[in-house]
Amino acid sequence: MRTMNYAVNVRVYQKVAVVNTMLAPQELIDSSQVTWKEKDITNLHGQPIGEFAKLSVLQTRRRLKKGTVLVEGDLIPLDVIQRGQIVTLLYEKEFIQIEMQVTALQDGARGEVIWFKFPDNHKRLKGEVVNNDLAVLAN
């Protein structure tokens, strides 16, 4: 009986976003700065940005060179609330709804939970960012 070994090289190709110009850290990214190309993603570190990604609400985490395939770790959500900004924090429970004016202690993007404080007594609360001037008290 004879044994034969075979080596198989498998490559995975997918349509991905490729940077077509140099991008600085924290730079807003839009569709004009990327092109969609079919690329080999076999040895790519991270999940590539898919064809239907909403790039208009993202910014770069680090500097990206021309020709870089965008992965999820390269982009972060755009900060909607900046540290020090006064926003409305909403508390809702069954039939009760209370709105409070608080100061953001951190930058936060839509959907993130960040810290807020009351301006008068400095009590801290966590809230989930809804938009640029509204957050909901986190449970």
Image (cartoon, rainbow, N blue to C red):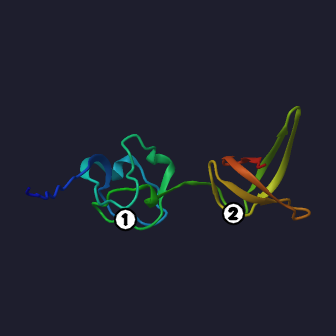
Q: Quadrant of residue 53?
A: top left
In-image side of 89 versus 75 (left or right): right
Residue under label 1, please give it. Answer: 64
**Structural crowding at the residue carrying mark 2, measured as other residues with C-alpha within 10 Å and reported as few (<14), some (14–19) or many (≥20):** some
Q: Residue at x 31, y 61 (%)?
A: 68
Q: Amino acid at mark 1?
A: Leu
* Rendered location of residue 112, percent (x, y): 64, 53
Q: Which mark is residue 128?
A: none
Among all residues in the image, which is located at the extreme left? 2
* Rendered location of residue 105, percent (x, y): 74, 64
The front one of 119 and 10 is 10
Q: Residue at x 42, y 66 (%)?
A: 24
The front one of 115 and 12 is 12
Secondary structure type for disc 2: loop
Residue under label 2, please give it. Answer: 106
In-image side of 83 versus 31 (left or right): right
Tag 1 near tag 2, CB within 8 Å: no
Q: Residue at x 65, y 61 (%)?
A: 107
Q: Amino acid at mark 2?
A: Gln
The front one of 136 and 10 is 10
Which badge, 1 or 2, is on the more N-terminal residue? 1
The front one of 98 and 41 is 41
* Rendered location of residue 93, percent (x, y): 85, 38
